[in-house]
Amino acid sequence: MRLLVFYSASVALLPSGNVLAEETKAFGQINKYLRINGELMGSYELWDFFRPEPAINNNSSYDLWVLRARLGALVATPYVDGYVQGQYIGLYGLPDDAVARPGGPLGLGAGYFLTNQSTNVGNVFLNQGYLHFKLGSLGLAGTFLKAGRFAYMEGLEYSSGIDKFDGLKQRRIAQRLIGGFNAVYVGRSFDGISVVHDNPTFNWTASGIRPTQGNLSVQGQKQISDINILYTAFTSKKDALLPGTEARLFYINYDDKRHTQVVDNRPLNVRPWLNDQRLNIHTLGAHFLSLHQLESGSLDALLWSAYQFGDWSGQKHAAWAISAELGYQWFKLPFKPWLRAIFYQSSGDNDPEDNQHQTFFSKVPSGRIFAKFPFYNLMNIQDLFLEIIASPTPKTQVNINLHQLSLTNSHDLLYRGLGASLNSGEFGYSGKSSGGDRDVGQLLDISFMHAFNKHLSLRFYYGHAFGGSVIKNNFQGKKNANTFWADVSLAF
């Protein structure tokens, strides 16, 4: 079975050295050195969010439109490749009455408006522009160096060439902590340098990068110069260590000294500003992914974990997160059903006054991959869910998830947000009081994806949240929520 995973043409340029220059001649190939690629994507979103009462500007039901266009040119030579890509992003019909006081943004449309301060906003900027040096000619076989502005997806340092295996990596491993995935339409790029050594048994990657603005802000040209990230990972490729298994060890240092106030469970008036007491967080982690073909189907398993330590704006930081997953797909049944069970939990802070911060920090992730309805994220959360995937046709996939959500620690906040959008003024995460409870609620989400061909794809998503006691403590007016989006993507 082919696992359908839809990415834009730009994201196909992985930092592992397996770039488009190595593909066979395709549409957009001008000659053996030059290829033009691009994407045109249109999206419609409908939001029916939780609603606080009493509050002003608490319109929780609205819709919006998105248009994104990208055009890139890749020049490939035996020694160095060069790539440049421009992007237009337009957000239309954003609500100007959905940033509740109190309550904050009621859904992503309100978050876009709060960040951009306009109901219709657009911009053109450089999304990628880099040189990719192939160092084999210098006697360093399998070694590459990339410098400039590029897309970055930690956890996806190489591709195995097996669709299902790589699809699991893309959906359930990659970009948990560093990424710029397009589920939030502006995206996020990174400025810096990345060195890769890749051979048949392992991949070693080391990078020093800074994120660009983006995410919720259309001002994606600007670099967030006060965030510095160091990342390195050693990946034992599939079958190299154990049959059917890949293993990765990784380290991340995240240093943030922006002019912005930190968000945690301390009272607002005592939370420091990062330009006075910055964040400096170290993360050590690992994952193991295994896929085995059996007579009637396939068995997959995943273990991902991370431990953090360092300084959290004047507090000692110590936190953790873990995810364990198990799945089985039946090849001989109609629609080839695939059932997966997932447990994820991250630590929360028990005491805001003990000078120790214990909330797991998500850094700059592609958070909407792991929370498609982003009224929560991967901080201070326990997410236990079942996933059912079916393929009515070889080009169609239906994905149904049922989540049970609760806070790890009731003395901490319910966090949401997708990481830094701006160089100053916004932290990138917000938090709601638990009210002393842990039950966040249940989430049912349904995704439909169809690829008409390798250029044209269609996606639908619907999510319904049944608010638990934590939601009810914060949103007295409306305790359940819905969201729907549909997009069409043309890539070449």
Image: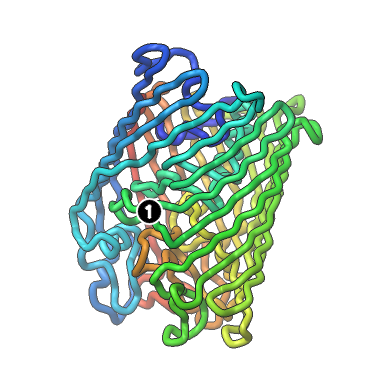
Question: How many numbered markers are drawn?
Answer: 1
Q: Is residue 190 above or below residue 300?
A: below
Could you say where residue 168 lies in the image, as x and y percent from the top left?
60, 38
- The residue singled out by tag 1 in the image is 223
Q: Residue at x 39, y 25 (%)?
A: 74
Q: Is residue 278 above or below residue 214?
A: below
Residue 333 figure quarter = top right
Viewport quadrant of the C terminus: top left
Q: Position of residue 458 (x, y in %)?
A: 37, 33
The residue tagged with tag 1: helix, strand or loop?
A: loop
Q: Nearer the viewer, residue 163 or 203?
A: 203
Could you tell me which quadrant the N terminus lies in? Answer: top right
Front position in the image: 404 or 489: 489
Task: Judge left or right: residue 460 versus residue 64.
Answer: right
Q: Nearer the viewer, residue 216 or 486?
A: 216
Q: Which residue appears at 22% of the width and 48% of the height?
A: 122
The answer to whether any part of residue 129 appears in the image is yes
Horizontal side of 163 relative to 13 (left or right) equals right
Q: Amino acid at mark 1?
A: Gln
Left or right position of 293 against 97: right
Residue at 38%, 30% (x, y): give it.
457
Percent coordinates x, y for residue 242 in the rendering: 81, 35
Out of 291 and 229, give the one closest to the viewer.
229
The reply to whether residue 22 is visible in this rendering is no
